[in-house]
Image: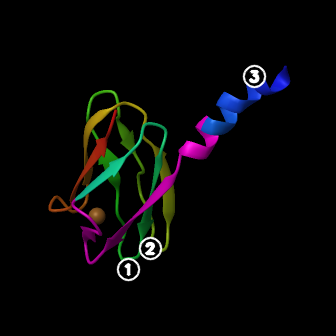
Amino acid sequence: MLHHVLLPILLMTHRASEVVIIQKERAFSQVEVTVKPGDRIVFKNEDPVVHNVFSNTPGQEFEIRRQAPGGSSSVPFSRPGLVEVRCAIHPKMKLTVKIRE
Ligand SMILES: [Cu+2]
């Protein structure tokens, strides 16, 4: 009987994945990325400068804050929809995260 409870949990765990977005030369490695609800984006700073990646999209607000060169931060995305990601230090850096249904 136990597997009736565990199987859905295992399937959910299995389906979630991580997508890596790199900050390099003051730009995101992609302008748009599509993920599933529950996926995480790992933001990696491969620049020699500090970044501060954030989003003000309602329901999906976050702010990594001061991310030093070589730093890496994992952010979960849960709600289907579009999330606009920016860098507070470099206004030209833009990433659209599409969380599909
Ligand atoms: Cu930046």
Is disc 1 placed on a helix, strand or loop?
loop
Which residue in the rendered view is the most extreme toward the right? 1
**In the image, residue 5 above or below residue 18:** above
| Colour treatment of the image | rainbow
Whether label 1 touches label 2, CB < 8 Å: yes
How many numbered circles are shown? Answer: 3
- CA gap, disc 2 and disc 3: 46 Å
The kind of residue tagged 2 is: Pro
**In the image, residue 81 above or below residue 97:** above
The kind of residue tagged 1 is: Pro
Whether label 2 touches label 3, CB < 8 Å: no
Q: Which residue is mark 3?
A: 4
Q: Which residues, given as a range, are shown in magenta? A: 12-31
The kind of residue tagged 3 is: His
7 or 71, which is in the foreground? 7
Q: Looking at the image, which residue is at 33% across and 32% down?
A: 80
Give x and y (percent) for residue 12: 59, 36
Q: Which residue is mark 1?
A: 48
Q: Looking at the image, which residue is at 38% across and 40% down?
A: 62
Give x and y (percent) for residue 60: 35, 34
Q: Which residue is mark 2?
A: 69
Which of marks 3 and 1 precedes in the sequence? Answer: 3
* Magenta stretch holds residue 19: yes
